[in-house]
Image (cartoon, helix red, strand yellow):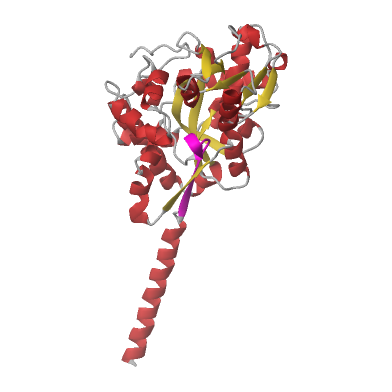
Amino acid sequence: MTHPLRLIRWLVVFGLFVLSAGAARADAPSVIRMAFPGVGVGNRPVTGGNSVSTVHLRGMLEDEFKNDGIQINWSFLRGAGPATNELYANGLADFSLLGDLPSIIGHSGGLNTKVLAATAIRGNTYIFVPTSSSIQSVKDLRGKKVAIFKGTNIQLSANKILEKFGLKESDIRAINMDTATAKAAMATGDIDAAFGWTDYLSLRDQGLARLLYATDSSDTNAYRHCSFIGNEDFIRKYPEITKRVVKTVVLAAKWLSEQDQNPAPAFQLWTRSGVTFANFKEDQGTSSLKVLSSPLVDEFLSTQYNKNIQEAKRFGLIRNTFRFEDWYEPQFLQQVLKELNLEHYWVEYGADGKPKLKT
């Protein structure tokens, strides 16, 4: 009788072990699906210019979760923000960097997302025209064929810039083109102008385009912002995993901030996207890499998002408005900053865009 009883006890213990192991696995996903709204030059699945790109290039998420057996699946989308929203709508994305307008469009339309941290804030917007163009001012774009990547944060910035010069999007012949298509159309003279970002600078360097307009620190209303967002279902199901993902983004922002006095290592890393070192350097200008990389969702950023929500409605880009504060999920970033002793590492900015005075 002894051996059967021992066998039964062993089977019971083994069964409990299997059940507990299954429960542990249920607390973590087998894969984390990262979406990125963009591609590198030549459609390569690599980008640069921000903390999430840095997470990818340095393999930081893969390192964070390798001992857990959790795979990291990156999707780089030529369709940018609208394509990222499609992934969320179909339950195929867990986290992503996403520009202000597409994320606002998605949330306004019912996508179940949460803002978790800032990334790629204070982005510039450029307007390029063919080298031989007679266009000398933004006002001259009236009636012209102008490429705008609609549904991305470039569209909202474009509307603000046009309005600054007394124009509306309906005053130009706006053509929806992704970046690669618009760059090709610019080179062949099939469009009169294009709103774009850093990778358009290569056209100017090749003598195929001329820079007509660029935002700067005096034009903060037209800045483009991005945030790190997540699928709310994933966040609720895997809060500890979510915190570790946010921690990884914060650590990437910290690494970039450490390069503030000499950004060369960051620019060199980002060149794997196909954008040149010189173009990244030019785009940053005199701005602080530490400021641009800050993960803080401070008064400045929340005010910018609330304004952009209203502006998106005014320009007819969304139907329903909402409060940014109801969309932002602060707990993970707050926990990570405390655990990493980074609560006062980045400067907080007030609603007016100026550093907040310490009390």
Query: Which corner quadrant of the image does residue 89 belong to?
Result: top right
Q: Nearer the viewer, residue 290 or 212?
A: 212
Image quarter where the C terminus lies is top left
Residue 42, compared with residue 33, is above or below; it is above
Q: How many marks?
A: 0
Residue 191 horizontal/vertical position (percent):
64, 21
Residue 93 horizontal/vertical position (percent):
54, 45
Q: Is residue 190 magenta?
A: no
Q: Is residue 59 left or right of residue 239?
A: left
Residue 243 horizontal/vertical position (percent):
41, 41
Image quarter where the N terminus lies is bottom left
Q: What segment carries the magenta color?
A: 31-43
Q: Which residue is farthest bottom?
A: 1
Q: Is residue 34 magenta?
A: yes
Residue found at x 44% / y 14%: 350
The answer to whether any part of residue 229 appears in the image is no
Residue found at x 36% / y 14%: 286
